[in-house]
Amino acid sequence: MKKLTPEVKKLLINFIGFCVFFSIIAFSLEKGIAYFVTLSGDSQTGKVNLIMEHKIDSDVMIFGSSVAEVGFNSNVIESNLNKSVYNLAIDGTPILKSEFLIDEFLSYSEKCDTIMIGLAFFSFSKMQEMNEPGRYLAHKSNKYLKENIRKVAPELHAKLYNVPFYSFIVADHTYYKNAYLGLKNVINKKTFYGNQEKGFSVHDETYYDTRSTDGLKMDIEFSEKVIERFKRVVEKIKSHNITPILIITPMHINGQSFYNNYKEYTNIAKDISEKTNTRLIDFSKSNITKEDKYFYNNGHLNKLGALTFSKNVCDSIATNPQTPQKVYVKQK
Amino acid sequence: MIFNSLDFAIFLPIVFILYWFVFNKSLKLQNLLIVAASYLFYGWWDWRFLSLIIFSTIIDYSIGRKLKVEENTKNRKLLLWISILVNLGLLGFFKYYNFFLENFVAAFSFFGSEIKVNSLNIILPVGISFYTFQTLSYTIDVYRKKLEPTDNFIVFAAFVSFFPQLVAGPIERATNLLPQFTKERKLKFLNIQFGLIRILWGLFKKVVVADRLSLTVNSVYNSPDDFGGIHYIIATILFAFQIYCDFSGYSDIAIGTARMFNFKLMENFRSPYFSKSLGEFWRRWHISLSTWFRDYIYIPLGGNRVKKHRFYLNTFLVFVISGFWHGSKWTFIIWGAIHGIILVLENILYSKKTITNKNKSVVYSIIKTLVTFTIVCIAWIFFRANSTSDAFLIVSNLFDFSQPLLSVTRGMHLYLNNPLWKFIGNFILIAVLLFIEYLIINKKISEVIIIKKKPLFRWCIYTSLILIIMIFGFYEIDQFIYFQF
């Protein structure tokens, strides 16, 4: 082999030395931060941690997006059903983007008998990216999460799992804030087991019509692939002897009218319910949808709306406990 | 391909390894690799526009060779004009066609006659203004017999398309860059260190400072109706630093990348916001463009060796042209005109003033710096505004403080659409930047100083900088502002 010139030798030695030095520092920092993030109980990251760290197991679990997070009042449902309830819906995250949470939960849960899935108009739309990856980044080695990212955001998957220290680029300020909160928990010797509201997020606000003023209407784009995946999630829950219940959450009639094909969304939900023989509770025509006082915007219920809706959900379950499917709440 | 992308992070090491360890036996092969890499770099964005670069290269290479043997002045002039017309023709078509068309129609309708013409949906090829000016400088210098034209097509193609500075400069002079393609190159560890430090500093400016500031700036400038005087002032100050960090960051990365391949590019910025006059500002801002205008437009027009009124006109004209070079919008022309007018006024004022000790005091210097910065910021309003009407709206309401800085929207306390910590973060970034720039101009910190330190110290600096860029960088913007020019 040809002898290396002194300059090349210097370059190689320095390059290798620096790479080792940098890798040690960056690796320690990456792992250290991730560790403290897993100890945070704050907000959405806290919810993810509850499942990923196996710190929550209730009789009834609620999954979904922000619509479910602000709609299902866990304490109300708990007192009505006389079962332990936790709302694990994640803000800004359609159910299939948080499929890993269901997978992880199913892998360890011993207590759960019912999973309520809060549906919203975008539940069957095409997904292109994972929202706010900082919420689950600390658990990136989890096999279910890895698979979930691969299915939803293949480009992110490729970068996150192949580019060294890519977590630093993906992480946002909430990630570092959670690392700080986790560190604080360690210093104060605190552990977290969820909040008093049991995952439910209270919004004590009045209604604000969020439709655009130009009167334009939009179409909801549905994805066959997402619908098929959704069915598989339902089947997966059932295979663990847990009863899934699909719930079409109330959307203000102003919001419904903004979409040309809102009906199609409810039809898809009904179709999934029939094909998977799963119970569906439909609030798309409920009286709640007609009253401003129940909402803080077109898609989200406020405190009073959540209370009414949660009671209605319990009533519906109580009045038809054995009905496997097609239980619709109409004009209640 | 842009510098702050994963693609470039893969592209650069591959080209570097091929250049120094595979093709290092022959200069010809190294130059060929530069051409191939540069075309790939450019084609990554849109391969169709590669044809424009290749066309420009062939034309100016051929004209350069013809000028070498042609002695007849008339014929030489003709050759020069062919080059100018071809290059400016391409630039004019892609950049200014629709602008002229729209203004032509507007002028006719102003005089009462409506005409119907179809505007074209033209995509502006990235970097066309930069490489066009670079090739023009070659032909003009050859015509002026300041430069011996090259007979080597690959060398010339490498000069035109050299990827570090292809899309946003520095606009190199053929007299500086071209000879570097014919010199033997040896791998020097020092150059690589210098290059990497410069790249990191450029990345910091771009992804940590410029792109973060852009979020606040865009929120105000994209809907100025929603904001008031205090917001405009803050957003404009932030924009001043955004555009500086965006553009000088690009230049730093370009200079650093070129240095890793043993090429020395000209400096494009020298802490311009520390300038004490507008004239000084233009000696520190986008130096490669301002010196291009000086050498190829201002001096041929007579420069300052003409009667005073002509000198003032020359100054004004050069800045209007400079504004027009930036983009085919009236906002850029007004921006250039403002600089031209102020420079003329500055010349009138300074020619009558004598320098006293009082003028040299620190306080006086600070006041001059602040005044210069304020003028530059007022001009930036036109540069950044989406339209002339937006710009005039902002200028006319600049001192209307009826809207409070803090707004409460749906329970959220926002400062220019930002939560407090993000809003304050903008100013912390600027303070950090100015502090480092201050150290740089006072020679307390430089690439050479860092390189001389012990390895462990250096590695700590590099590691910190890389982690800061990764953690604090904003990665959702895939453009540099100057790409649009």
Image (tube, rainbow, N blue to C red):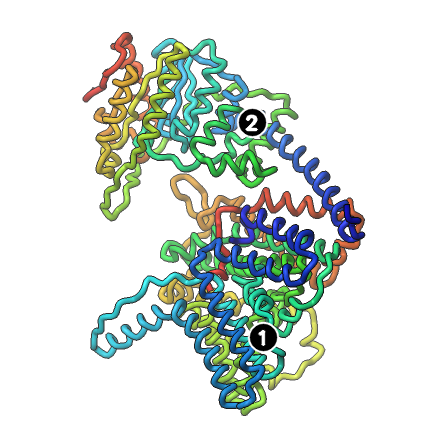
Q: Quadrant of residue B276?
A: bottom right
Secondary structure found at label 2 = loop
Query: In this rendering, is residue A49 above or below A260?
Result: above
Give residue A141's mark.
Answer: 2
* Label 1 crowd (10 A; few <14 / some 14-19 / many >=20): some
Residue beneath disc 1: B291
For this view, does B48 lie left or right of residue B66? Answer: left
> What residue is rendered at 67% in x and 81% in y?
B355
For this view, does B112 lie left or right of residue B372? Answer: left
- Asked whether residue B345 is in view, the answer is no
Q: Position of residue A203 (x, y in %)?
A: 38, 30
Tell me the kind of residue under disc 2: Ser
Query: In this rendering, is residue B181 above or below A299?
Result: below
Q: The residue marked by circle 1 belongs to what chain?
A: B
Foreground residue, B158 or A85? B158
Q: Position of residue A153 (x, y in %)?
A: 45, 35
> What residue is rendered at 69% in x and 56% in y?
B24
